[in-house]
Image (cartoon, rainbow, N blue to C red):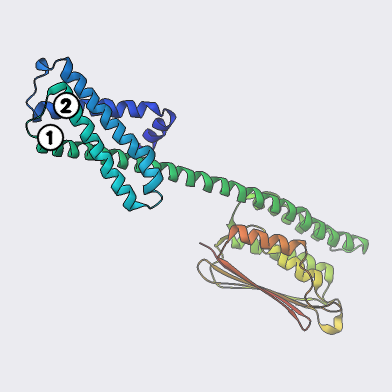
Amino acid sequence: MLRTLVNAIKRNFILPHILFWAASIVFFAVVLVYTRDFRLSAIDLKIAVSFFITILYLAISVYINLLWLIPSFFKKRRFLLFSLLEIGNIFLFVLLNYVTSIVFEGRHPNFISEAVAEIILVTIFLVVTTLLKFMRDSIALQDAEILVKEVERQKIETELQALKSQVNPHFFFNTLNSLYSLSLDKSDLAPEMILKLSELMRYVIYEAKDNKVPLSRQLDFLRSYVYLEQLRYGAGLQVSFTVNGPHTDIPVDPLLFVAFVENAFKHVTRTASQKPYIDITFEVDQPGRIRFIAGNNYENREEGRKEGFGLLNVRKRLDLLYPGSYSIDIRDRDGIYLVELTLEVK
């Protein structure tokens, strides 16, 4: 309700000031009636003019504070100078009001008590209006922070959608190549591969649109993908796919790990004498923590190969999805390529 009221006030800057000073006139009049034993019927033109001039002096002191002292000194942490000028602002009000009282009401018999009352009055107005300003500034700052966070969230979602749209055709291109190879060989496995491919396509087209899916669904997807790749490579390739731990319900990005698995199949050695292998392991023995390891052996290329499209893509998505909550270690030496990714999922 408070935020709604502030938003309404922000849409009309003059209205809250009018309401505040109207309430101040009522408050000031009540104070005068009870402290000076005034009667409304006894108020003449001079007293009324003096009264409104006092309100005018209060407004001058308040706006000097709000528009000059706070922005120029308090917010810049020049507190000593701010305090001295604020005291000067208070005594300016007392002096002006004293002169006005002489002109309209004559000299007051007890100047000290009158000055103390005026100092208390102007101090109350300064404190109240300062607190109102800080409250409004605080709410405005919160609104600005919320807006910035919303813009950042939309930007991240846009970038993620763009990255996903790049993954899908890349993944299908590689999988269709596998199907094409089997078709050329007139393999009896081609129909089964088409069926598996349709399952993969259903996952990518429908479930991959979600921001998060349970890890178990992605494991099923990866098992189907590994099965298809094994069909293409034949019995000479040994593939191990292991899941350790019960926490497969952890929500993750739907296509987060496929690039690493693709990369392993792409670069694994084709030489039978080297006993080509791919090891894929998921460790989910702790809630909210995923440790993924993918390794393969290779041949006939220099160590430290440049990362391809898929790995660059997944790094960008990790930065967007899990900033500060992941670690990745890639080792490439002695004919073995190993990726170790650890995620802390909140």
Q: Amino acid at mark 1?
A: Glu
Horizontal and vertical percent for residue 278?
74, 75
**234 relative position to 227: left or right:** right
Horizontal and vertical percent for residue 12?
42, 27
Circle number at residue 100: none
* Residue sitting at x 68%, y 61%: 314
Q: Is residue 156 above or below residue 291?
A: above
Q: Is residue 317 above or below residue 230?
A: above
Q: Nearer the viewer, residue 121 or 275?
A: 121
Name the quarter where the N terminus is drawn: top left
- Asked which quadrant contains residue 329, the reply is bottom right
Q: Amino acid at mark 2?
A: Ser
* Residue sitting at x 8%, y 20%: 39
Q: Which residue is mark 2?
A: 101
Do residues under tags 1 and 2 come within 8 Å of each other at their CB atoms? yes
Circle number at residue 114: 1
* Residue sitting at x 84%, y 62%: 178
* Residue sitting at x 79%, y 81%: 335
Horizontal and vertical percent for residue 223?
70, 66
Give the alpha-carbon distance from disc 1 to disc 2, as whole Å: 10 Å
Q: Is residue 92 above or below residue 343?
A: above
Q: Is residue 344 visible?
A: yes
Q: Secondary structure at mark 2?
A: helix
**113 relative position to 14: left or right:** left
Q: Is residue 279 visible?
A: no
Q: Is residue 119 above or below residue 32?
A: below
Q: Residues within 10 Å of mark 2 (few under 14, many from 20)?
A: some
